[in-house]
């Protein structure tokens, strides 16, 4: 069973309160391009994230707005920033790391929301049934890109009725497997 594979670079999902503090009250994000998942888009706007040790500028905002701010970075980014965020499933933010968010109109210190995203597969319940997968199941995915390639274990199956089938890796994982931007993986149950 094959599944489309993409690298998900560092990005942030903002809640309304934080967007207003960073860009001004009632600010609306400007869509740059649609993403693979229906309704999600990369915004033209970006922010800077800062810790006591370092900062990273031009962190892309992904819309639409969420109920909680979630910042996803790689382990390499974490080392650069001098932080040790937990590896978490999407939305599992309680007790995660924090940092400072800097926008053109203000700053926000988040106490939690900074994570390294657990490698995961997006599927609708219907597609999961086709693949023979149940919610919260873990699988392996093999990437065979000729010279490099890799098999990733403990891949979380994330279900939502609006999801399009997609295996998401962060930049560290994608680079290790030799993925340029998009590829295909083989699901191993």
Image (tube, rainbow, N blue to C red):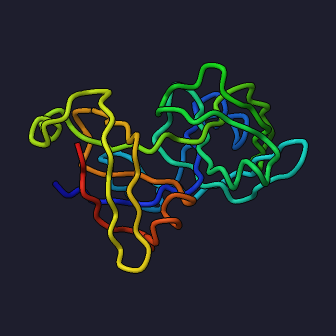
Whether residue 27 is visible here, answered yes or no, is no
Q: Residue at left 47%, top 33%?
A: 90
Place residue 162 in its image quadrant.
Answer: top left
Eyeballing the image, is 59 above or below 84? below
Q: Who's the residue at 9% across and 41% down the image?
A: 130
Q: Is residue 17 above or below residue 102?
A: above
Query: Considering depth in this image, is 91 or 58 the residue closer to the camera?
Result: 91
Hey, which residue is sitting farthest top in the picture? 94
Q: Tell me the quarter of the image containing the N terminus.
A: bottom left
Is residue 41 visible in this depiction of the protein?
A: yes
Residue beneath the point at 72% across and 41% down: 22
80 to 154, vertically: above or below = below
Which residue is at the front of the view, 63 or 164?
164
Quarter of the image where the C terminus is located: top left
* Whole-percent x, y for residue 64 in the image: 45, 41
Question: Between 139 and 79, which is closer to the camera in this rendering?
Answer: 139
- How many numbered circles does the render carry? 0
Residue 131, position as x, y percentages in the image = 14, 42
Side of 59 relative to 33 (left or right): right
**In the image, farthest residue toward the left:** 130
Residue 125 location in percent, x, y?
17, 32
In this view, which residue lies farthest toward the bottom?
A: 147
Question: Residue 48 location in percent, x, y?
Answer: 75, 51
């Amino acid at each position: 069973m094959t599944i489309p594979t993409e690298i998900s670079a560092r990005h942030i999902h903002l809640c309304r309160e934080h967007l207003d503090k960073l860009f001004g009250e009632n600010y609306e994000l400007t869509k740059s391009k649609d993403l693979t998942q229906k309704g999600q888009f990369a915004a033209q706007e970006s922010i800077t994230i800062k810790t006591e040790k370092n900062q990273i500028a031009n962190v892309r905002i992904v819309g639409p707005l969420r109920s909680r701010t979630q910042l996803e970075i790689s382990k390499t980014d974490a080392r650069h920033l001098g932080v040790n965020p937990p590896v978490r499933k999407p939305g599992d933010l309680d007790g995660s790391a924090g940092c400072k968010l800097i926008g053109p109109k203000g700053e926000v210190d988040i106490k939690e929301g900074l994570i390294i995203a657990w490698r995961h597969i997006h599927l609708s319940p219907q597609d999961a049934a086709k693949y023979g997968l149940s919610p919260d199941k873990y699988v392996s995915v093999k990437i065979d890109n000729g010279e490099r390639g890799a098999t990733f274990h403990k891949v979380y199956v994330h279900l939502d009725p609006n999801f399009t089938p997609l295996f998401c890796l962060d930049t560290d994982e994608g680079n290790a497997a030799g993925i340029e931007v998009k590829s295909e993986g083989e699901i191993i149950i």
